[in-house]
Image (cartoon, rainbow, N blue to C red):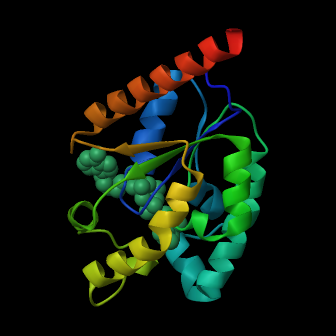
Amino acid sequence: MNPAPNLFLIGPMGAGKTTIGRRVAEHLSLPFHDLDHVIEEHTGATIPLIFEVEGEAGFRRRERACLADMVALDGIVLATGGGAVLDAGNRALLAARGFVVYLETTVEQQLARLARDRKRPLLAAPDRRERLEAMALVRNPLYREIADLRLVASSEHVPQVTVELLHELERIWRRTDTTAAA
Ligand SMILES: Nc1ncnc2c1ncn2[C@@H]1O[C@H](COP(=O)(O)OP(=O)(O)OP(=O)(O)O)[C@@H](O)[C@H]1O
Ligand SMILES: O=C(O)C1=C[C@@H](O)[C@@H](O)[C@H](O)C1
Ligand SMILES: [Mg+2]
């Protein structure tokens, strides 16, 4: 069993936090929440519109508030947005309130997976590769800082990655159980 109250997925845009998180939650019979969707619901506006009206700073304020609400829950799987770890307070909350899985990916994979995406305002750049590389430079150390588990998805097949993550969690949580019982 998960010794932490929650399971949190972190990692860059297009790493699969939403996709894999939803499937893992289903397998674990836990409620799934996606922080981006929570923000949109609370605001009554899409993420692109929030960025357009309030800028990234406004979006980050809303992200902080919604993240604080979500981590207060118990027994959930939460997929965060790619930039949630930029805030030190968010990082502290995630580390304190759950088991943190860092889904790793490469810029190459991001470019392929998000090629047709128009819903991520930070990707609206003339050179997407350059933008993603710059973000990785700043953010990857922050993901690493709070990760309890790093998963380099070896497959482009979503069900396969889901199974890989479930196996890793089972292995780690079984070990934690044994240690606690000893
Ligand atoms: N392991 C995978 N193999 C192939 N495609 C994937 C994989 N993981 C995710 N995808 C695809 O990549 C796209 C982006 O995935 P997803 O929305 O889950 O990313 P995310 O990590 O939640 O990103 P964000 O931080 O922007 O919310 C989706 O179309 C999804 O189907
Ligand atoms: O990487 C980011 O900063 C973002 C990722 C998305 O999940 C959204 O949270 C938003 O588009 C910003
Ligand atoms: Mg997502």
Residue occupying the point 68% across, 32% down:
4
Q: State whether residue 20 appears in this view.
A: yes
Disc count in the image?
A: 0
Residue 66 position in % (x across, y down): 72, 59
Q: Is residue 52 above or below residue 68?
A: below
Residue 130 horizontal side relative to residue 38, left or right: left
Residue 103 position in % (x across, y down): 41, 49
Query: Quarter of the image containing the C terminus?
Result: top right
Query: Quarter of the image containing the N terminus?
Result: top right
Q: Is residue 95 above or below residue 73?
A: below
Quadrant of the rendered structure where residue 44 is?
bottom right
Residue 109 position in % (x across, y down): 23, 60
Residue 99 position in % (x across, y down): 61, 38
Residue occupying the point 28% across, 64% down:
110
Residue occupying the point 39% across, 24% down:
167
- Please, which residue is most extreme toward the bottom here? 126
Q: Is residue 170 above or below residue 106?
A: above
Residue 148 horizontal side relative to residue 164, left or right: right
Residue 62 horizontal side relative to residue 85, left or right: right
Quadrant of the rendered structure where residue 112 is?
bottom left
Q: State whether residue 42 appears in this view.
A: no
Residue occupying the point 28% across, 90% down:
126
